[in-house]
């Protein structure tokens, strides 16, 4: 078994064990790093300190998740062609992608890399880590403190104070 195959098997086991029981940040982040070893990860604190007008922030969650809240200035898409079009304007130097916890966004960054994006990174822990750190969120109405919890299992990683009230 090759080194990559062992790493992928270990990552799948970490993610599967987190998915079966009470997920932990440590298991999740380790699994994502092992599953996507070539995807650069940027922490919420680092992004907040370095974000500027030349950073394209992309949300790849489902549209209903994005509508609840997003990082300030984030754009929504699930298509590499949209990122290519936004980037071709010349206004951006790098792209940072996020989802709920980082799996979907790491996969998207991998697709961006295959499409030639050298300066693409995943927001490690994604919007859950961002919100848990107390950083600002917005929706179409302005600032908000709510985040779509994705599902009951993974939503456990999001501080309950950010969960929308059940209908």
Image: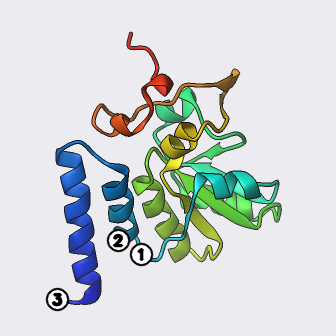
| Nearer to the camera, 4 or 83 | 4
Name the element at disc 1: loop
Is residue 64 toward the left or the right of residue 121 in the image?
A: left
Q: Is disc 1 in contact with disc 3, using a CB cutoff of under 8 Å? A: no
Q: Residues within 10 Å of mark 3 (few under 14, many from 20)?
A: few
Residue at the disc numbered 1: 37
Residue 6 in picture, x, y percent from top left: 22, 80
Name the element at disc 2: helix
Q: State the mark number for residue 34.
A: 2
As drawn, 5 above or below 83: below
Q: Quadrant of the N terminus?
A: bottom left
Q: Earlier in the sequence, mark 1 or mark 3?
A: 3
Q: Is disc 2 in contact with disc 1, using a CB cutoff of under 8 Å? A: yes
Residue beneath the point at 67% across and 56% down? 47
As drawn, 132 above or below 26: above
Cα gap from disc 2 to disc 1, whole angstroms: 5 Å
Q: State the mark number for residue 1.
A: 3
Residue 116 position by quadrant? bottom right
Residue beneath the point at 23% across and 42% down? 22
Is residue 127 toward the left or the right of residue 91 in the image?
A: left
Residue beneath the point at 38% across and 14% down? 166
């Amino acid at each position: 078994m090759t080194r990559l195959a062992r790493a992928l098997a270990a990552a799948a086991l970490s993610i599967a064990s987190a998915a079966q029981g009470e997920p932990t940040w440590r298991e999740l982040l380790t699994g994502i790093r092992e599953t996507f070893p070539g995807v650069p990860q940027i922490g919420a604190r680092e992004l907040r300190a370095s974000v500027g007008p030349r950073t394209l922030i992309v949300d790849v969650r489902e549209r209903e998740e994005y509508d609840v809240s997003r990082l300030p200035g984030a754009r929504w898409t699930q298509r590499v062609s949209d990122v290519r079009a936004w980037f071709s304007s010349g206004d951006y130097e790098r792209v940072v992608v996020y989802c709920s916890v980082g799996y979907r966004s790491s996969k998207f960054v991998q697709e961006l890399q295959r499409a030639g994006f050298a300066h693409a990174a995943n927001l490690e822990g994604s919007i859950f880590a961002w919100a848990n750190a107390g950083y600002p969120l917005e929706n179409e109405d302005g600032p908000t403190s709510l985040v779509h919890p994705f599902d009951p299992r993974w939503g456990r990683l999001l501080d309950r104070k950010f969960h929308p009230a059940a209908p």
